[in-house]
Amino acid sequence: MRKSMRMILGVGLAVAVAGAAPAARAGQHGACAVLDSPFALSEIVEAAVAIEPGTPIKAGFTVQPTGAGEPETLFKVKLRKEDGGKALLFFDTDTAQQVVPVEPQLSLLEAYGLALDAVEEAAGEEGAVVLRGRLRHRVFVPNWWFAVVAPDAKLVFARVDAVDGDVILLTPKQAARILAKHKIHKKKRIYRHVSGKPFRCDALDEDDDVEDDDLISLD
């Protein structure tokens, strides 16, 4: 039996800070976490509209890396706001609390400088060239990513933590693995029983939407 949303809707709506993400339970990722949630997707949509009045245009789940250990699955609702524009809201699958994305503290230029310095320090000489940079704004771990040509003419990716400024240098192969890491958990053959019959939790993948990354950054 699913919990009532009456204590969630209203003035006293609880909000969870993404920076304090709880440790995800083993195996509960993607569709598994949604099936095990005591809340229906319709209740989450109602909660989203109560926070941000508008017209819902998409609702589902997202598997978000947490920066350490297991990823976290969240409900997400995209809606068209009454006053124009779109909004993307996230909710905990266990409590239905709204999860507010971690806000980046570093600007593009600040992160640019850190990435360039790290590449040149690793190479032991100057002459690195930054080709491009973008904010990869995941809910719990916002990072700046830069493609840099090192002084030895090799391509390097610099991942700059948008909160504390830590820099990790990666080869193209390592970078590709990290960007896809959160998808690995959804490929495990884990089953949940629905009406007495087994359902394979990785049968449904989350939707990838480039616009969602940008909407996370909006208030």
Image (spheres, grey):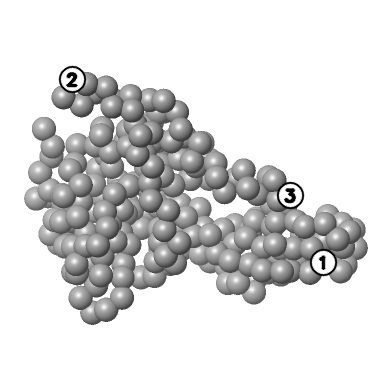
Q: Does residue 173 sit above or below 118 in this rendering? A: above
Q: Secondary structure at mark 3?
A: loop
- Which corner quadrant holds the N terminus? top left
Q: Which mark is residue 171?
A: 3
To which residue does mark 1 refer? 128
Label 3 to label 2, Cα distance in Å?
47 Å
Above-or-below relation of 76 to 37: below
Between discs 1 and 2, the one toward the N terminus: 1
- Kindly check if marks 3 and 2 are in contact, taking CB atoms under 8 A apart as contact: no
Identified by mark 3, the residue type is Thr
Q: Residue at x 27, y 22 (%)?
A: 198
Q: Tell me the crowding category of disc 1: few under 14, some 14 to 19, or many 20 or more residues within 10 angstroms, Cα based.
A: many
Give the residue displayed 58% in from the left and 72% down from the top.
Answer: 107
**Residue 26: where, in percent of width, then height?**
41, 28
Q: Residue at x 13, y 39 (%)?
A: 3
Quick one: SS at disc 2? loop
Residue 82 x/y as whole percent = 20, 75
The quarter holding residue 156 reads bottom right
| Sequence-earlier tag: 1 or 3 | 1
Mark 1, secondary structure of its residue? loop
Quarter of the picture holding the C terminus: bottom left
| Residue type, mark 2 in image | Gly
- Residue 206, x across and y down, in percent: 38, 46
Q: Is residue 122 above or below residue 26?
A: below
Neighbour class for label 2 at 10 Å: few (<14), some, many (≥20)?
A: few
> Which numbered mark, 3 or 2, is in the foreground of this view?
2
